[in-house]
Image: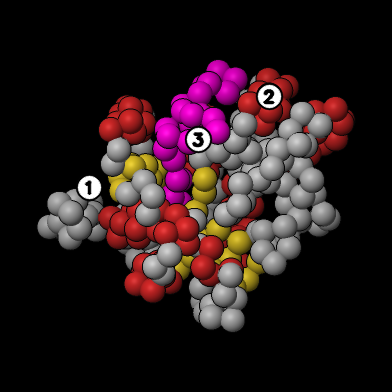
Amino acid sequence: MAQKRQPEIEGLIIVKFKNNRTVAVIQARLGSERLPRKVLRPLGTRPMLDWVYRRVSRAETIDDVVVATTIEARDDELAEYCDQHRWHVFRGSEADVLSRFVGAAKCFEGDRIVRITSDCPFIDPALIDQVVGVMNADEQVQYACNFYPLRWFPRGLDVECIQSKTLESLDKIVRYSDLREHVTLAVYQNPTHFKIRGSCAPRDLSQHRWTADTESDWDLLSRIADAMGHDKFDWLELLALVEKNPAWQQLNAHVQQKIA
């Protein structure tokens, strides 16, 4: 069993782990505006968060997975759900998501943090490994993702990997609330100040939208989940399914992505 040390942040017990850890942090809350409580809403036979957690956990480059939710009372249910499933959970500010990620990184001693949002039930573990691999190939890289500078992957497959030291630097210098809410926005808005690397899909598939933000999105995701019948498919199998059913893509083609 890991040996515990004295609390270092707000009364939390910090557990001592091995060095060079890559920790996936799943950002989740129940207070989403356009689709409230979506993370615990059943997708197929189980909550959407369960899809995300299971698929992220299959990534070979991930040492640990943490659900980062808020300290708001409405998220007590979400924290309890994580506890029931013996998942790591970290609670922090609702609006200041950057501070929440910094806290999770410190608590679980991640040297690198993979940021995943909980509204992406079909996140692909192989794409997580691909993005982490970009960072593994060059220790000087501070940030890697699969949507910058070119967004060619479908929405819903976004993966970001950031050095914890870079997160801590952002925490010290970023002051605007919108930048703190979106965690890494300040990095790719200022590419000359950070060493950034990206990975790209083999062709432009950005017209596809596999994320849950509206009822129209949910309609598409539900059809996919029901057609697949399991959660162990990869993103290329998903793409093939959607392309065989072209009318599905029109279900949420009108949805405007919230600016991040």
Among the two numbered marks 2 and 1 on one chain, the one whose residue lies closer to the N terminus = 1
What residue is at 63 percent from the left and 26 percent from the top?
A: 215
Which residues make up the magenta segment?
Answer: 24-46
The amino acid at mark 1 is Met
Neighbourhood count class around disc 1 (C-alpha, 10 Å): few under 14, some 14–19, many 20 upward: few
Label 1 close to label 3 by CB (< 8 Å): no
Q: Which residue is mark 1?
A: 1
Q: Percent position (x, y) of residue 72? A: 30, 38
Among the two numbered marks 1 and 3 on one chain, the one whose residue lies closer to the N terminus = 1
Name the image quarter holding the C terminus. Answer: bottom right
Mark 1 vs mark 3, foreground winner is 3
Is residue 42 in the magenta section?
A: yes
Q: Which residue sits furthest left? A: 6
Q: Does residue 84 appear left or right of residue 210 in this picture?
A: left
Between 245 and 76, the one lying in front of the other is 76
What residue is at 59 percent from the left and 81 percent from the top?
A: 192
Q: Percent position (x, y) of residue 31? A: 43, 34
The amino acid at mark 2 is Asp
Above or below, comparing residue 214 to residue 97 in the picture: above
Neighbourhood count class around disc 2 (C-alpha, 10 Å): few under 14, some 14–19, many 20 upward: some
Q: Is residue 237 visible?
A: no
The amino acid at mark 3 is Glu
Q: Percent position (x, y) of residue 91? A: 30, 45
Mark 2 vs mark 1, foreground winner is 2
Numbered disc 3: secondary structure: loop
Q: Which residue is mark 2?
A: 219
Q: CA distance from mark 2 to mark 3?
A: 18 Å
